[in-house]
Amino acid sequence: MTRPVRDIVAECIRRERYGLIRPLWADADDDSREEVRRRADHLIRLLADYGVQMLRTGEPAPAETPTGPAIVANQVYAQPDTMREVRVDVGKFSIVTVKAGDATAEQSFTLNEVMLNAGLVLADDPAAKTIKGLGRQLAAATEIYRLNAAGMGGGK
């Protein structure tokens, strides 16, 4: 069954804004989907005003499974030869700095550990200030969830 373009655009708008969340688009009730569909209709009209038309060219290819351990990589500010990566390891995630090809693990954690640490921050617990690299850890967890990588290794 071919889905309408407005439905695909609506699902993409929702996913761009919130990430891959539950209920999944296919599981959501029609009333909640209709609100996002109206936003999609508006976006499609705006694009048409600029001379852009959406054309379905076929069925989407299945999403590829990443083959490497890196989930996301960012260049470190003011250090053009240094990248910071969030990687998946067996049973955990790691934040790794790669400088001139040499990788150095900064920290490793499970998502359970991150959630406990996030609770410390929300509770204003002074212990949160003693956790080295907590900001990076929380930022890494955000990227892990945003990119739907929670089940890749350090799940739970």
Image (cartoon, rainbow, N blue to C red):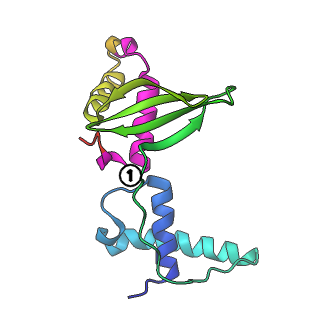
**In the picture, residue 56 is in which quadrant?**
bottom right
Q: Residue at x 33, y 72 (%)?
A: 26
> Which residue is identified by label 1?
148
Name the one closer to the observer, 152 or 51.
Answer: 152
Exactly how many numbered labels are in the figure?
A: 1
Q: At which x and y percent is residue 63?
A: 42, 65
Q: Is residue 58 left or right of residue 145?
A: right
Dot 1, crowdedness within 10 Å: few (<14), some or many (≥20)?
some
Region of the chain picked out in magenta, as a range: 128-152
Name the one closer to the observer, 9 or 60.
Answer: 60
Q: Is residue 140 left or right of residue 99?
A: left
Q: Residue at x 66, y 29 (%)?
A: 81
Q: Is residue 101 magenta?
A: no
Q: Residue at x 57, y 37 (%)?
A: 74
Kindly identify the amino acid type of the residue bearing the numbered disc 1.
Answer: Asn
Task: Tell me the SS state at disc 1.
Answer: loop
Q: At which x and y percent is residue 128?
A: 35, 17
In this view, 116 is above or below 147: above
Residue furthest front in the image: 101
Name the one closer to the observer, 47 or 1.
Answer: 1
Q: At which x and y percent is residue 28?
A: 31, 68
Quadrant that contains the N terminus: bottom left
Main SS of the magenta part reads helix
Q: Is residue 107 left or right of residue 102?
A: left
Quadrant that contains the C terminus: top left
Q: At which x and y percent is residue 119?
A: 30, 27
In this view, 38 is above or below 16: below
Residue furthest right in the image: 50
